[in-house]
Image (cartoon, rainbow, N blue to C red):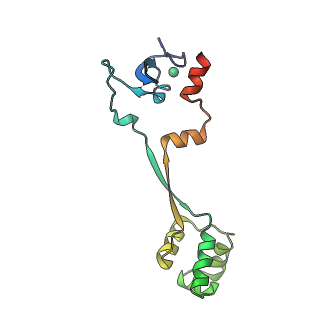
Amino acid sequence: MKTCELCGKNTERLYRVLIENSILKVCIDCKRYGKEVDENNNLVNNKNTKVMEIVSEVIDEDYNKLLIKYREENNLKQEDMARKLNMKESLYKAIENKKIMPDINTAKKIEKELNIKIIKKEVLTENNRDRKNHDYVTVGDIIDFEE
Ligand SMILES: [Zn+2]
């Protein structure tokens, strides 16, 4: 067993990483805090360590305001909008009143028919996502802790 120089955990495999100007041998969990280097201390350009980006489509929270704006600008009634979008008037009203959130396909149909934008693209990086979901300590925290 080897010991991670950052968190002190025992591990089968250590990775050489550059963290704040020093080379440390760390476990796979701590690897992300630094940049991986090879035996000659050259940075390794490993595709697997590339930050992953996840693009997700979300419906704009103000989608109903955009619908109302469109409707008012075009002098349309709710029933006209329903007809335009080929949906029941009751459904359209529920969507406009935010009682029902349109699903992504309905939202796309609305965008196409009305030529407005109600879908937002959110780009999440692996890092962002981790930070949102877990409260893990940052490199700075660990170094302070060790001192
Ligand atoms: Zn570690």
Residue 111, image x, y percentages: 50, 73
Residue 10 lies, with reference to residue 133, above or below; the image says: above
Residue 2 lies, with reference to residue 33, above or below; the image says: above
Count of number-bearing discs: 0
- Answer left or right for 100 relative to 19: right
- Answer left or right for 17 relative to 79: left
Q: Quadrant of the C terminus?
A: top right
The residue closer to the viewer here, 35 or 55, is 35
- Answer left or right for 88 relative to 10: right
The residue closer to the viewer here, 79 or 120, is 120
The image quadrant of residue 64 is bottom right
- Answer left or right for 103 relative to 18: right
Residue 53 lies, with reference to residue 109, above or below; the image says: above
Which residue corresponds to the image point at 66% horizontal and 80% vertical from the top-left? 90
Which residue corresponds to the image point at 43% horizontal and 43% vertical from the top-left? 52
The image quadrant of residue 17 is top left
Residue 73, image x, y percentages: 58, 84
The residue closer to the viewer here, 118 or 20, is 20
Extreme residue toward the front, this view:
21
Residue 38, image x, y percentages: 33, 22
Which residue corresponds to the image point at 49% horizontal and 15% vertical from the top-left? 5
Which residue corresponds to the image point at 33% horizontal and 20% vertical from the top-left? 41
Residue 20 lies, with reference to residue 109, above or below; the image says: above
Extreme residue toward the top, this view:
1
Residue 112, image x, y percentages: 46, 75
